[in-house]
Amino acid sequence: MDKKYALDFEKPLRGLIEQLDALHQLSEENHIDVSSEIKAIEAKIEQTKKSIYSNLSSWQRVQLARHPLRPYSLDYVDAIFENFQEFHGDRSFRDDKSILGGIAFLDGKAVMIIAQQKGRNTKENILRNFGMPNPEGYRKALRLMKMAEKFNMPIITWVDTPGAYPGVGSEERHVAEAIAVNIREMSQFTVPIVTIVVGEGGSGGALGIAVADRVLILQNAYYSVISPESCSAILWKDRSESSKAASALRLGDQEMLKRFGVVDDVIEEPMGGAQNDPGATAKSVESMLKKHLSELVSLSTDELLEKRYARYRNLGELDDGKVIEINEAAS
């Protein structure tokens, strides 16, 4: 855990880590044997980690999904693929930096990458529009997906957005239409499509690049029809009720998403989140991605389209048992 970016619920852990650092410094500077005290605090740290991270609330998982040191889409692309070549522009208005795309190689085979990207600092966030795409971003994504279709390349999309940008200019350029067209077109592409939700997966902003044959999600990411702040503003007229909204939406409940077919697999993260070991997380993502991609490329075009149709046709169909289960969990 990075002490500088410790979240509110991580403060007890940060205090223990500071005590441990102080003991190490005392031992080095004064040549005092404090090994027993160090062992005791190390044991307390491990116990506190398990206590905190094994009982995370929905809002705490949202906070982890937004952690400023969490690996972003481009971090995974750089770690997993070779020779990524980014393409720019929608050939109509401009280049939207919140969605990047291009060709890369996975085990020597070409794939098309479409990724939503946030920034690490203020300058980057302004450049990336805080990961909130404008309509030209979705039109760029569609242009590149059509290129992938033409050259028979699998499409791999990376979701990390609180939602599409809701500004006046975005609405004037028809962001809802751009997302709707992507949803329609992605349902019909004849190449395999895999989506990985690596952080936030909010609303149509996520769905605009996520109509896939397989949807994977990281353990501490969330995938929802709305962000908790927007939900709070609508239901309680107060964005400060975001934690209540997150709980009502059951954000971060990956097993529920998997049980009802919204996602196909959950990718485990290191204790405390992907930011604690980005390399190990990238390896887990790579392994899961290759597993699902290999299954998809073995299908014929007809099988691929039939399974994709069935996947989305079955979403939202609940039998009596599942309805009861959801109602009991929500009450």
Image (spheres, helix red, strand yellow):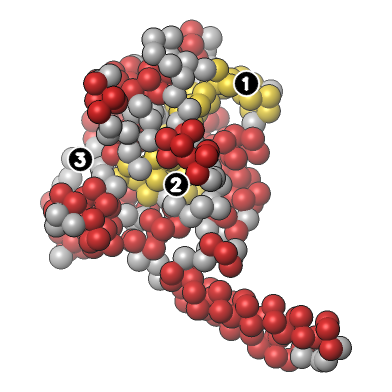
The Cα–Cα distance between marks 3 and 1, rounded to whole angstroms, is 38 Å
The Cα–Cα distance between marks 3 and 2, rounded to whole angstroms, is 24 Å
Position of residue 206 measured from the top left corner of the image (x, y, whole percent): 35, 35
- Mark 3 or mark 2: which comes first in sequence? 2
Is residue 208 positioned above or below 88 on the image? below
Q: Please rate how many residues cluster around mark 3, counting C-alpha atoms within 10 Å: few if below 14, some from 14 to 19, many from 20.
A: few
Q: Please rate how many residues cluster around mark 1, counting C-alpha atoms within 10 Å: few if below 14, some from 14 to 19, many from 20.
A: few
The residue where tag 3 is placed is 316
Extreme residue in the front direction = 123
Q: Which residue is pictured at 38% across the width and 30% down the height?
A: 133
135 or 306, nearer to the observer:
135
- Residue 297 seen in this snapshot: no
Position of residue 288 measured from the top left corner of the image (x, y, whole percent): 54, 41
Query: In this rendering, would 4 be left or right of 200?
Result: right
State the mark number for residue 85: 1
The answer to the question of whether label 3 and label 1 lie on touching residues, with beta carbons closer than 8 A, is no
Label 1 element class? strand
The residue where tag 2 is placed is 199
- Mark 1 or mark 2: which comes first in sequence? 1
Extreme residue in the right direction = 31
